[in-house]
Image (tube, rainbow, N blue to C red):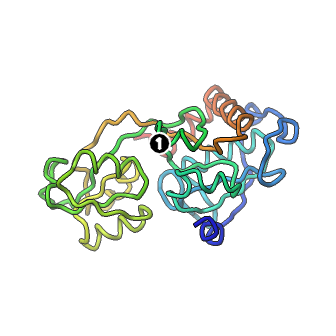
Amino acid sequence: MLAALAAGALALSACGGGSDDAGSGSAEESGLNLVSEGSLTVCSDIPYPPFEFEENGEYTGFDMDIMKEIASGLDLELAVQDVEFNGLQSGAVLAARQCDIGASAVTITEERKANLAFSDPYYDSLQSLLVPADSDIASIDDLAGKQVGVQQGTTGETYATENAPEAEIVQFPSDAEMYAAIQAGNVDALLQDLPVNLGHTEDGSFTIAEEFKTDEQYGFIMAKEGSDELVAAVNEQLTALRDNGKYQEIYDSYFAQ
């Protein structure tokens, strides 16, 4: 599986544009044990808007913009690899040293902590149920006998399995396949993170039937072993970005109503 992930990875580089306020010295001085000297190599499952997506030949999105700032604060270039989410959230690609850090809307859970090191939380999330605008599904209680699309390995899949036991859960590798399936009428609903589902409501064809408060928080992920210095450096950058207002600026550009 790792060989396939490595072969299929799409690597793009981007110079971080972070503010000087967040700077804390070079990676060489801090001993971050990076995959590639002078670069912060980030793995992400792309596309997953608004957190990560490709636009005009570059990777952008909330996660990517935060990563650019963190890399810049560490005096590093940013290199991005596109990988499947399941290999990322399991820790496989990090353990294989394919990348230094994962930025892919990964919810912090106790189960994942067994295989991953997490940064401090950087985003609070809700789950949600997306249905066609003319659907008779009004809540999760209406899913008995319905086909519900979920992304494999996500907390959305877990929530659907635990809370809609009479539904037929259909797994997909990414949001792109899920959305195509509901557009084609192959599934009746999608259960996943609210910001992603909201992006599918813009043309009026689909609507959010229900939101679910799950107290989830996202964290950036690193290898379980040998990443103590990198975790500390990333947390330092997150604190600096909150203190200097850059985090709020990025947040508002994607989520302000």
SS for tag 1? loop
**Most foreground residue, 28 or 162:** 162
Give the position of the C terminus as an image quadrant.
Answer: top left
Task: Tell me the residue at 58%/56% (across/down).
Answer: 44
Give the position of the N terminus as an image quadrant.
Answer: bottom right
Question: What percent of the width, then of the height, locates residue 244?
Answer: 66, 28
Question: What percent of the width, then of the height, locates residue 71?
Answer: 73, 45
**Most foreground residue, 90 or 147:** 90
Question: What percent of the width, then of the height, locates residue 36?
Answer: 80, 54
Task: Tell me the residue at 39%/58% (across/down).
Answer: 151
When asked about the image quadrant of residue 119, the answer is top right
Task: Tell me the residue at 69%/63% (across/down).
Answer: 12
Relative to 24, does residue 165 appear above or below in the rendering? below
Task: Tell me the residue at 47%/42% (across/down).
Answer: 107
Relative to 243, does residue 231 appear above or below in the rendering? below
Question: What is the count of numbered marks?
Answer: 1
Crowd class of label 1 (few under 14; some 14 to 19; many from 20; radius 10 Å)? many
Q: Image check: 18 left or right of 110?
A: right
Q: Which residue is mark 1?
A: 107
Relative to 197, does residue 253 appear above or below in the rendering? above
Please name the amino acid that badge 1 sits on: Thr
Q: Residue furthest top?
A: 243
